[in-house]
Image (spheres, rainbow, N blue to C red):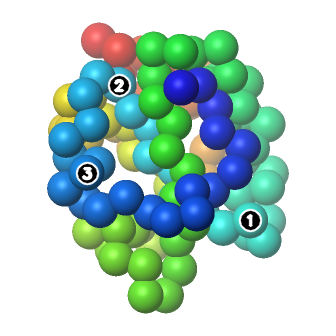
Amino acid sequence: MPYAAQHLAQPPSRDDVDRLPGATVVEFGTPWCGHCQRAQQLIETALKDRADIAHVKVEDGPGQRLGRTFGVKLWPTLVFMKDGKEVARLVRPHSGQELQNAVQAVLA
């Protein structure tokens, strides 16, 4: 499941995220966030051909519990997880190299 362009209609529960097997990137943001829009090309480039990494795109905001359980304060926040455990985190990524480093960390 490579790059996901759209946010999920219904966010998963924290338990569901913690049970995801293998490498996963959970992306928190909103469709209207300028920082999120600017980061999409970098995120897509890093994940578009990565069938070995699941990309879960979650719309965050007031009343959204999942982002709070991860301590999300700024968008976009990308949480790189391996078998349900966080191994890396990027907040407002600015370079493809940052993303590549995190991808390598989640695959290690």
Name the residue carrying label 3.
16
Q: Residues within 10 Å of mark 3 (few under 14, many from 20)?
A: few
Residue in the foreground of this view, choosing between 27 and 87: 27
Name the residue carrying label 2.
23
Q: Above or below — where is 63 with respect to 12? A: below
Q: Which percent across, then down, holds residue 87?
A: 27, 34
Look at the numbered disc 3 and give the secondary structure of its residue. helix
Tell me the tag on residue 31.
Answer: 1
Q: Residues within 10 Å of mark 1 (few under 14, many from 20)?
A: few
Q: Nearer the viewer, mark 1 or mark 3?
A: 3
Q: Above or below — where is 27 with respect to 3? A: below
Look at the numbered disc 1 and give the secondary structure of its residue. loop
What amino acid is at disc 2?
A: Ala
Q: Residue furthest front?
A: 9
What amino acid is at disc 3?
A: Asp
Number of callouts:
3
Q: Which percent across, then down, holds residue 8?
A: 57, 56
